[in-house]
Amino acid sequence: MSKPLLIPWLRTKINSGQYDGVQWTNPEQTEFSVPWKHALRQDSSNTDILIFKAWAETSGNGRAHGDHSVWKRNFRSALRAKGFKLISDNKNDGANPHKVFRWPEASASGANSAAGSQEQDDPDLSEYFPLPTQESQVAPNFEDYLYLPEDTVFSEHPGHHVILQECLMGLNIGPNTEGTAGFELPPEQQQLQNPAVIGGHALPGQQQFPVVYKGEAGLPEQPAGPIEGAVGGAYDEQFAEQFKHSVNNTRDGEHFKTHFRISVYYRGVKVLDELVDNEVGIRLVYSPQLTGTVLDPGSGLSLVSLPSPGAMLDQTQANLTQRILDKLGEGLDVGVSGSVVYGQRRGEIKAFWSRSKFDESRQPQEISKLQPQPLYMFKEFIQGILDFINGKESPPSSLFFCLGEKWPDKDNRPWDRKLITVEVVLTSMEQLKNMAVGGGASSLQSVELQMSLEEMMDLY
């Protein structure tokens, strides 16, 4: 016996009025609400999950175990697989917890949609990879920390698409042809003549001149804190001069120089801490056979392999993490070209970034696969130092990445609750920031220093 078609089945159920709260919310019958009450609420009852149970019994999934959370997940995933869009999430409403969905455009018109009657249901995930029915040590509730994206995240054949989409429930693994998420380049970066050039400088591996390595000594030594006598004091001429000298040591003409300290976290637990003394940049990959950092001669970048999740106690988390790693492909580049720190993804896995670990914008910034993308410009950091001198917050010195999941997401889930996150510290910026903060803004209030910093910004 074949499975029923979701779209005509659901339209019939909404029209029947037999499920409390499952109803049309507009006259055109293109939007409908579904009760969405958490099982732990004191006022929860069996009537809250009747529509989920009905689909589980009709489709043949979830009936044997009777797990309410599995019924709800399968129902939600079936909606997403068929193009239903979540337009209002009120699951935390105290009086009436519910969600509102929009009908797929192709089948929104007419009570007996032709498109709906012709649909072909994809196989359900639980037939291939059953979701857990018991609480997990690390992730007690999938719905609390993973979510299905509103856009398509796989570009494979339909059956595999639904299997992986259901299993990963929110992991954004995009096709190779997927573009960027609309990050607008600064005006000075919009003169790219080809994807191999950014900020007027050729990228590593495609430069007109060979990459020059400084050896193990790396960057000129910079103090981690202020010189003696500068802490907390008023303007200190010697300290201001030392700070100016340290800033000059971070550049070679128009080229910004830095090393990279990489910290990798698997759901908030640090699994790798690596300092890379390569001024060209790094490429994050998943290559278990690599031991330590390896230089890629073609690009000049240092390859840093993310560790295997096999040792995790929670096998569900380990499996999901492994799926992301397997899609990392040629990896994620973070490098320096001229005075620009850029990023570019090269594998199938999508990556998102921010300059703050506590970004609450709820607007994910996707790293482009099509061309190198500016993430941080040295002159922006210098402007941040000037702002700090004038009483504002100190500038950031790290870049934060999330692999496979949108972040910051619309539900404002913390960075350290995502499956794979990476902090990349730009060590030159970190040293200058520590020096400025340690000495205090007042110790840098030198007209000569500020004019020097402003002139430096004009060079970039």
Image (tube, grey):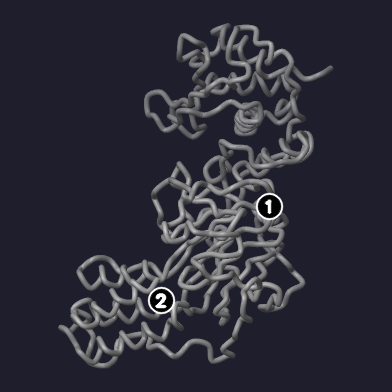
Relative to 99, residue 402 above or below: below
Task: Determine if residue 398 is in view.
Answer: yes
- Position in image of residue 83 (x %, y %): 62, 27
Q: Residue at x 55, y 72 (%)?
A: 262
Which residue is most to the left? 234
Is residue 410 placed above or below 289 in the rendered structure?
above
Q: Amino acid at mark 2?
A: Glu
Q: Position of residue 71 (x, y in %)?
A: 64, 29
Which three-letter amino acid code belongs to the residue tagged 1? Glu
Query: 84 and 202: which one is in front?
Result: 202
Q: Which mark is residue 348?
A: 1
Q: Quadrant of the C terminus?
A: bottom left
Specify whether 1 is left or right of 82: right
Residue located beneath label 2 in the image: 430
Give the x, y percent position of residue 79. Answer: 62, 26
* Horizontal and vertical percent position of residue 84: 58, 25
Along the line of sight, the residue nearer the viewer: 182 or 221: 182
Q: Is the residue marked by circle 1 packed among few (<14), some (14-19), or many (20+) residues within 10 Å?
A: many
Give the residue drawn at x 44%, y 77%.
254
Left-right relation of 3 to 87: right
Above-or-below relation of 8 to 440? above
Rendered residue at 59%/19% (across/down): 51
- Label 2 crowding class (10 Å Cα cut-off): few <14, some 14-19, many 20+? some
